[in-house]
Amino acid sequence: MALSLQKGGNISLSKQDANLQRILVGLGWDPRSTDGQAFDLDASAFLLTASGRVRGDQDFIFYNQLRSTDGSVEHTGDNRTGVGDGDDESIRVDLTKVPAEIDKIAVTVTIDEADARRQNFGQVGGAFIRILNEDTGQELTRYDLGEDFSTETAVIFGEIYRHGGEWKFRAVGQGFVGGLGPMARNYGVNV
Amino acid sequence: MTALQVGQRVPLADLNLDPAALDVQVHCDLAATDVTAFGLQDGRLADDRYMVFYNQPASPGGALRLTGQGERTDFTLDLTALPGSVTEVVLAATHDSQPVAQAHTLSVTVGGAGTGSASFDVKPQLRAEKAVMLVRFYRHGGAWRLATVAQGFDGGLDALVRHFGGEVAAPATPAPTMPAPVPPAPATPRPAPPVNLRKERQRVLLEKAQTTQPHLVNLIKTANVSLEKRGLSEALYRVNLVLDISGSMSREYRSGAVQDLAERALALAARLDDDGQVDVYLFGIKAQRAGSLSLDNSRGFVDRLNVRLEAGTHYSPVMQLVREDAQAAGHRLPTLVLFITDGGSSNRAAVIRQMTDSSREPIFWKFMGIDQGGVNFDFLEKLDDLRGRVVDNADFFSVPAPITTPDADLFELLVNELDTWQAAARAARLLP
């Protein structure tokens, strides 16, 4: 049974599974059930150094740049509507390939054209992030965001980070004003 | 007053609102918009009694109450009095024919005596929805929260009810109650009914009722529920009201019961009749036309008739008059006759002939007996089951005097069998 996290909670992935090498970060949300423009949610990953910033634009993994140059992080592609069971988007991370200078991988979700469509996360239901051992398919941990956001249009769902030789995961659930652009700039990406 | 944004989720406590005493006001200036409070279990409409609207203004125990209607719809909510099975309450605005966005104003205010208050402007969020969820109150971690929604369905109330997992009554597929002696007509396609025009007329009549006679609005809507159940929401009829003026009816005229019945006939006509009028006939010994009842003259209509009661009850002359007028109108539309009496007729053979002859005409007779006690309605019962007719063209029911039958039940009785007659009349080619 995977351990469910609350907002702010963390868990040692390495302790959950001593042989852990590659993980799959699954993200999901309920599709829009009412009439109107679908919620097009985009997952992104930022490879961050100890300073909390990217080394360069190549560390911003999103729908237009699906793989990091070292191959450690790979975005599996965009799902435009959230339709389908299980994960709507997923990001593969080969922990063994993550460069030593990368301290943390932040996984974020933003709503495409949120302002034009008058959409925000308060309207999105059933959002979650979960971490699986990609080699065994076993779910290691899961965080249901439920009530943890409201009118934000960008949310940091979670972070995978190094801690004393282990990999850990933190349920962040923190909203961010402004969407993907400002969020990327905040992490030091030139957009 | 806190202005809420769309998508906001906030504990009621943070707004200084009391879940046990909430006053909710929905402001909407689009006429004929209905506001409903849906008590749901995990997003599903599990118990219809927690659907509070004009036709059911309070949930069991009164936890959800509709307290005012009009451009401002008021609810008082005691969320703490709801059973645990009701996990959320969604307020929704719906319109039968127009997008709710046609409103210039659509907003929600939540407050209470001596508490804080919050408002949510829904209007800027609207698209083409004919049903829109406005706000929801929901349980979370032992406390109640408020979320703003402003999403809905272009398909209107039906789509919303389906969203809540409820079932929408399909138009009834009526079966004839008796085999028609004429072979059924081949299934030739009929020209599509002028649906939009029909809806438009109904809307105009409802709006007119809203501005001139608001007390009729709920009657019209209640009448519509009974018609919709039978797949008759688009049906077109001439509506006739035939009133007994025999001496024994005196108490019913004095008490206003006849006026009440006339208003119910008018409510049916507002849905069924193309001009929303009811042609009125009086009968005792003789028969007479008594003009047309409409939204313009319904107030005090029966009083103005200055009815002089007569010392006898003869159905046949007034039935003849009704048939002649239907004939003169070219039977362009079928005629629904609401025939109200408190006793049996003299010259029954003539009445039976009227019934049998008119079974070839597109006329349906609905006899309503007012039971003063001790009156024998055997004759009317017999009319209901009379043999030798092309189709079964009549139904009879009785209610005890004074009439206390709830409107929803009364409309059920008034339109009962109209659908089966219509199907049988079509099969017998009395109707196109």
Image: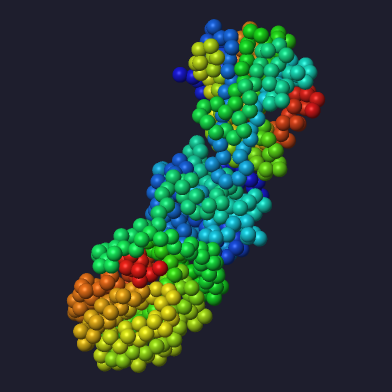
**Position of A155 compared to A129: left or right?**
right
The percent coordinates of residue B155 (x first, y second) are 53, 52
Q: Image quarter for residue B23? A: bottom right
Q: Please tell me which residue is depicted at 26% across the width and 87% down the height of the picture.
A: B313
**Position of B394 compared to A174: left or right?**
left
The percent coordinates of residue B218 (x first, y second) are 46, 67
The percent coordinates of residue B243 (x first, y second) are 34, 83
Q: Please tell me which residue is depicted at 62% across the width and 38% down the height of the picture.
A: A39
Is residue B326 placed above or below B430 in the rendered structure?
below
- Foreground residue among B191 and B313: B191
Is residue B186 placed above or below B430 in the rendered structure?
above
Which quadrant does the C terminus of chain B fall into? Answer: bottom left
The percent coordinates of residue A35 (x first, y second) are 57, 46
Q: Please tell me which residue is depicted at 41% across the width and 43% down the height of the picture.
A: B84
- Foreground residue among B415 and B253: B415
Q: Image quarter for residue A59? A: top right
Observer able to see residue B277: yes
Observer able to see residue B418: no
- Foreground residue among A11 and A20: A20
Q: Please tell me which residue is depicted at 58% across the width and 9% down the height of the picture.
A: A21
